[in-house]
């Protein structure tokens, strides 16, 4: 089909659809130019991916709720909770790794279910509901550990998963890739994914055509809490200990990654591939700044700057597509 | 279907663009490697006064020895500390110093540094596999000094508000000493309050105000103990505002704490010369490099002094 767009419009569309990717490419070029031998070493590329993995999974957790038009402020606390619990069960209660993971993810999923019920059934604002559940998670952390880190002898599989690799790809990165693949299929290649995006786009309209809006939103919170917990377990395996607040910082980075991701794949919308690109932008930035030896302030400028840019890009992309669709309708 | 293909094309183009960007940059001629040695310095909490001064000591010692320093403040993030070690390994630094963060939580970072043969020295983070040495003034004797003085001025009875912070190893060790010393004073009731991951000063001030309110009618001795100076100093404003009297104790001998002791609003702090501690940490780096890959310096003690109104003039004339 022949496009009726002008050259400028095509250029604008390209920038809007690929803005996140352009940012990632620019960062790679800048850091690669400033420190080519260090930045492009195999070891560093492995580092970028493995460092992005636990936070990347938490960002995916956030993406699931964003796709259905909600948000989950508890993801960072859920990550901390699961990371601490898994070590607590293994070290203090001598449970097996599988059982410890099962208990930990069960705990976060249960809290996610409560969040989902509060938000979708009781119609409590997600900001308040998920923040409240997040604080409950912090309370459980302190009840369980008294605020102290948990470290000790753990099954060998913890080191294998946390530090090992298969054909030069670290196991934590492989776990992230698995999460990406599963979520991509669910959100992009199944009717459920279509329903989720329909609810996120216009919940009232989705309800009128008979979609189970409240039910899907509730399960989105369960899925989000499960994934956040999984990210937290990955993090604790990386640290070699259970930390009471290790995952808390993932909330803001997760938001940055999801909003940056609106500038790619489904421009103006939240998507799994978009969030992955967003997470890589942040990690490449942090890694590159550390390698070239920028002062600490630079990291904060970068974090703040990317968040603002991400929001701006997302808004521009959203309004651009709205205008484009509006014009198509009029024609 | 068209939409699906369009998005798949975007995914493929993403990978292509990233690979192209990598190729473009990789083609740029590498600059000649610097001949000076480089230290990777990880600051766990850059807002802590002691850490700031210890950093000054490390930087001064590094400069004297002709080293350049790359500094990262991980703002209390243990994951950030692991990433920082890995990034420093990629940047091919000659040695790494990690301040305060518990060494037992640096597993992935230390594994990579060990593999690369880069020594990691901890300042007050404790020993763990992969740590060449730990320079610390934090030990049972220095931890107990202000606690014993506090128990003495309280006459062995009263109530204590204790600010703890378990993610930081020095604080955790001091809390352990608090438990062990206070167990010998059954007439002193200790109320613990765990500091949040950030905003320690504001939290300490508001918690102290609330604690004093609950003890408004109590006529016995009151004291506030914090595992480092900043929360202790922050508590003073709440004590002054309440009109109550409480003995305040902390650790590190920060400038604010020393001024407060001189002014009579704080009772005591343990002074570790942070700049000397920083210099000693850098000296441990040089020793570990001389010792080679199997360097095992163990725990290296740094001196301390309990500062009270009796001797504060030696530091603040």
Image (cartoon, rainbow, N blue to C red):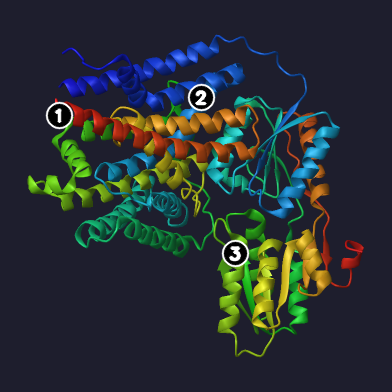
The chain to which mark 1 is attached is: A
Direction from residue B4 to residue B123 in the image, left or right: right
Residue B246 percent across, percent down from the top left: 70, 79
Q: Which residue is mark 2?
A: A27
The chain to which mark 2 is attached is: A
Is residue B233 something one can see in this rendering? yes
Is residue A275 something one can see in this rendering? no
Q: Which residue is mark 1?
A: A330
Q: Quadrant of the N terminus of chain A?
A: top left
Query: Is B301 or B86 nearer to us in this picture?
Result: B86
Residue B186 percent across, percent down from the top left: 64, 82
The residue lying at 46 percent from left, 39 percent from top is A308
Direction from residue B173 to residue A205 in the image, left or right: left
Disc 2 to disc 3: CB gap under 8 Å = no
The residue lying at 17 percent from left, 40 percent from top is A198
Q: Which residue is mark 3?
A: B202
Give the answer, above or below, for where B164 lies relative to B284.
below
Q: Nearer the viewer, mark 1 or mark 3?
A: 1
Give the answer, above or below, for where A273 lies relative to B56.
above
Q: Residues within 10 Å of mark 3 (few under 14, many from 20)?
A: few
The residue lying at 76 percent from left, 47 percent from top is B54
Secondary structure of the residue carrying numbered label 1: helix
Separation (CA) of disc 1 from disc 3: 57 Å
Disc 1 to disc 3: CB gap under 8 Å = no
């Amino acid at each position: 089909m022949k496009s009726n767009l002008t050259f400028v419009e095509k250029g604008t569309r390209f920038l809007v659809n690929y803005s996140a990717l352009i940012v990632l490419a620019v960062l790679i070029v800048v850091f690669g130019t400033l420190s080519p031998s260090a930045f492009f070493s195999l070891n560093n590329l492995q580092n970028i991916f493995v460092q992005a993995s636990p936070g990347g999974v938490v960002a995916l957790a956030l993406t699931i709720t964003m796709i259905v038009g909600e948000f989950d402020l508890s993801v960072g606390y859920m990550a901390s909770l699961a990371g601490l619990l898994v070590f607590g069960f293994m070290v203090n209660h001598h449970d097996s790794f599988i059982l410890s993971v099962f208990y930990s993810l069960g705990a976060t999923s249960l809290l996610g279910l409560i969040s989902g019920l509060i938000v979708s059934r009781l119609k409590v604002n997600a900001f308040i509901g998920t923040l409240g559940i997040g604080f409950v998670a912090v309370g459980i952390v302190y009840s369980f550990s008294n605020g102290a880190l948990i470290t000790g002898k753990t099954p060998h599989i913890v080191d294998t998963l946390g530090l090992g690799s298969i054909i030069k790809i670290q196991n934590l990165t492989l776990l992230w890739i698995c999460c990406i693949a599963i979520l991509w299929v669910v959100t992009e290649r199944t009717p459920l994914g279509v329903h989720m995006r329909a609810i996120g786009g216009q919940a009232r309209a989705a309800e009128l055509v008979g979609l189970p809006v409240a039910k899907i939103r509730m399960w989105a919170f369960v899925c989000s809490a499960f994934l956040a917990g999984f990210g937290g377990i990955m993090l604790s395996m990386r640290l070699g200990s259970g930390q009471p607040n290790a995952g808390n910082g993932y909330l803001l980075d997760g938001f940055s990654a999801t909003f940056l991701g609106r500038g790619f794949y489904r421009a103006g919308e939240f998507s799994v591939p978009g969030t992955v690109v967003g997470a890589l932008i942040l990690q490449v930035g942090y890694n590159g700044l550390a390698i070239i030896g920028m002062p600490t302030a630079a990291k904060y400028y970068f974090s703040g700057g990317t968040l603002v840019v991400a929001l701006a890009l997302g808004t521009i992309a959203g309004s651009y597509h709205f205008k484009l669709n509006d014009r198509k309708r009029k024609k | 279907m068209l939409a699906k293909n369009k998005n798949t094309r975007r995914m493929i183009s993403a990978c292509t663009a990233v690979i192209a960007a990598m190729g473009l940059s990789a083609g740029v001629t590498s600059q000649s490697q610097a001949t000076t040695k480089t230290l990777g310095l990880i600051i766990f909490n850059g807002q802590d006064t002691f850490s700031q001064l210890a950093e000054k000591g490390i930087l001064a010692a590094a400069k004297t020895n002709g080293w350049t320093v790359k500094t990262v403040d991980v703002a209390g993030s243990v994951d950030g500390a692991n990433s920082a070690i890995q990034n420093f390994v990629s940047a091919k630094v000659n040695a790494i110093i990690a301040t305060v963060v518990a060494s037992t939580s640096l597993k992935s970072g230390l594994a990579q540094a060990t593999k690369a043969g880069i020594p990691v020295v901890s300042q007050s983070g404790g020993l763990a596999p992969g740590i060449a040495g730990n320079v610390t003034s934090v030990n049972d004797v220095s931890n107990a000094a202000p606690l014993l003085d506090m128990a003495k001025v309280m006459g062995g009875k009263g109530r204590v508000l204790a600010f703890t912070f378990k993610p930081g190893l020095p604080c955790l060790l001091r809390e352990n000493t608090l438990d062990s010393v206070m167990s010998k004073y059954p007439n002193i009731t200790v109320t613990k309050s765990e500091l949040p991951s950030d905003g320690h000063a504001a939290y300490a001030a508001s918690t102290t105000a609330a604690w004093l309110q609950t003890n408004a009618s109590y006529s016995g001795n009151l004291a506030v103990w914090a595992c480092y100076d900043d929360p202790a100093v922050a508590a003073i404003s709440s004590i002054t505002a309440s009109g109550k009297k409480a003995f305040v104790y902390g650790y590190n001998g920060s400038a604010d704490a020393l001024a407060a002791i001189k002014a009579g609003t704080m009772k005591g702090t343990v002074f570790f010369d942070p700049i000397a501690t920083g210099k000693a940490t850098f000296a441990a780096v040089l020793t570990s490099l001389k010792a080679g890959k199997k360097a095992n310096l163990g725990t290296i003690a740094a001196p301390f002094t309990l500062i009270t109104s009796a001797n504060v003039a030696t530091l603040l004339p």
